Image (cartoon, grey):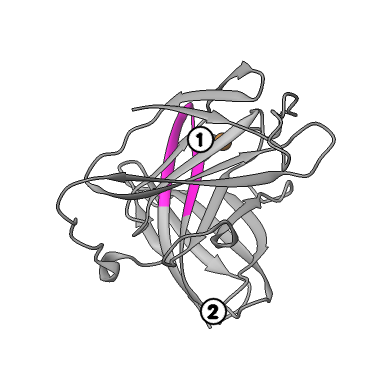
Amino acid sequence: MPLVIDIQDSQGKSVTKFETFQEKLMHLIVVSDDLKFFDHLHPNYKGNGRFEVNANFPEPNNYTIFGDYKPTGENEQVNVMKLTVPGSTPVPENLAKYSNTKILPDTKVNLNFSQPNLRAGQEVTLKFDFKEATNNQPIKDLKPYLGEKGHLVIIKSSSPLTVSDYIHAHALKNSPDGQVQFVTSFPQSGTYKLWMQFNRNGKVRTADFWVNVQ
Ligand SMILES: [Cu+2]
């Protein structure tokens, strides 16, 4: 489905100049409101504040779209858009199938925390370890993705989803080989979903996790 996004300032005037960050002018995160579906897109800038992209909405559901961009000379901003694909309500996700180990077709990703319990408002280091799924050896072909060792989006499960539920964490530059670390804090207690994206030798993979924050 083609999406057209017009960026305007608080006076309704088109914002026309944007800065590249993490290699793109806009990062667009599409999730279903139950956080089952995730997509990360990069709209094309058409000038005069207008971005266009083709997005995929796989099943009837309510969707929230976070547009993440940086007007020239200003701070990073996040816009929230809503879209409904009508139809029967999908089956909710089974959270029991999630653990801190995610096995993808070629990579095993382990998530560890710098402290035993996650608490709201407390800074925490999230450590993702990458191993070969077949033989458990640390992988050595991790390549930069969007200029960093990995890309992490965190969204708090909420109804409705708002801009304050969206956390975009940046990878630490000095993570050891076969590992990517992020420092972040979870603003409130609740359940959060994490999508960790990385580049294995040219192929972008997404490992998703659920975490509880007290
Ligand atoms: Cu992006």
Query: Could you say which is closer to the camera, residue 179 or residue 45?
Result: 45
Name, please, the residue furthest toward the left.
88
Q: Is residue 80 visible?
A: yes
187 vs 174, left or right, is left
Say which quarter of the image contains residue 122: bottom right
19 vs 126, left or right, is right
Query: Could you say which is closer to the camera, residue 51 or residue 214?
Result: 51
Q: Amino acid at mark 1?
A: Asn
Q: Looking at the image, in which quadrant does ligand 1 appear?
A: top right
* Residue 113 position (above or below residue 80): below
Judging by the rendered image, the residue that carries numbered circle 1 is: 199
- The structure residue drawn at horizontal position 73% and vertical position 39%, both measured from the top left corner, is 11
Q: Amino acid at mark 2?
A: Ser
- The structure residue drawn at horizontal position 78% and vertical position 44%, both measured from the top left corner, is 75
Q: Is residue 63 magenta?
A: no
Residue stretch in magenta: 195-207
Queried on whether the Cβ of the residue with tag 2 lies below 8 angstroms from ligand 1, the answer reads no
**Percent from the top left, x then y, of residue 127?**
58, 60
* Residue 206 position (above or below residue 71): below
Residues under labels 1 and 2: Cα distance? 31 Å
Judging by the rendered image, the residue that carries numbered circle 2 is: 189
**Percent from the top left, x then y, of residue 10?**
72, 43
96 vs 127, left or right, is left
